[in-house]
Image (cartoon, helix red, strand yellow):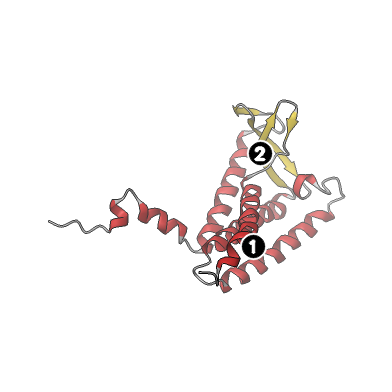
Amino acid sequence: MSDARSPEQTRGGGSMWRHIANAPWPVIAITVIVLDQLSKLAADAFLDYHEPVPLIPMLNLTLSYNPGAAFSFLGESSGWQRWVFTGFAFAVSIVLVIWLRRLPPWERWLSWGLSLLLGGAVGNMIDRLWHGHVIDFIHVYYGQWSYPIFNIADSAITVGAAMILIHAFFLDGRKGKG
């Protein structure tokens, strides 16, 4: 009896990773949104506000609410920032969807970066619309130094932005050189 699996499938799951790498951008963005929202619901339900729960050295779960933008920028304002940041996230999301729809299929790295950015922007936008603030809960620190508390959407935005920069500076120029 012959083995009907492809060489990629017999090499320890290469086909699975190829499938993940080729995932369409809506799947990536929706996955980020779902993971972000589920983790925020869990953090809000099971953590006490500003009470750290140590996971490992240098990493706590600490529930925090951010009414501002990154690093609580404009967090002390009177509330108008909620709608400005929501409108900005909505506009950026529309631009990202248009950009993603126009990308050729071989631009996987850029597609992943833009998809992560889109998922993160929508995840935080949902918080602003639903709660009036963004729920943060991941706290990285070392000694007296403490990084601002963040969430999965923030992580996706950071990784996505880094991927876009890597594409722009290192990958985009290789198109006609081979």
Q: Amino acid at mark 1?
A: Ala
User: In the rendered view of the protein, which quadrant contains the N terminus?
Assistant: bottom left
- Residue that extends furthest to the front in the rendered view of this protein: 177
Left or right: 25, with 48 as reference point: left
Q: Nearer the viewer, residue 140 or 121?
A: 140
Q: Nearer the viewer, residue 98 or 47?
A: 98
Q: Amino acid at mark 2?
A: Phe
55, above or below 2, in the image: above
Residue 61, position in %: x, y?
Answer: 63, 33
Left or right: 136, with 30 as reference point: right
Q: Are marks 1 and 2 in contact (CB under 8 Å)?
A: no
Give the residue drawn at x 61%, y 46%: 152
Which label belongs to residue 168? 1
Mark 2 surroundings: few (<14), some (14-19) or many (≥20) residues within 10 A = many
Give the residue drawn at x 49%, y 64%: 24
Please tell me in which quadrant of the rendered image residue 92 appears.
bottom right
Eye-nearest disc, 1 or 2: 1
- Residue bearing the label numbered 2: 137
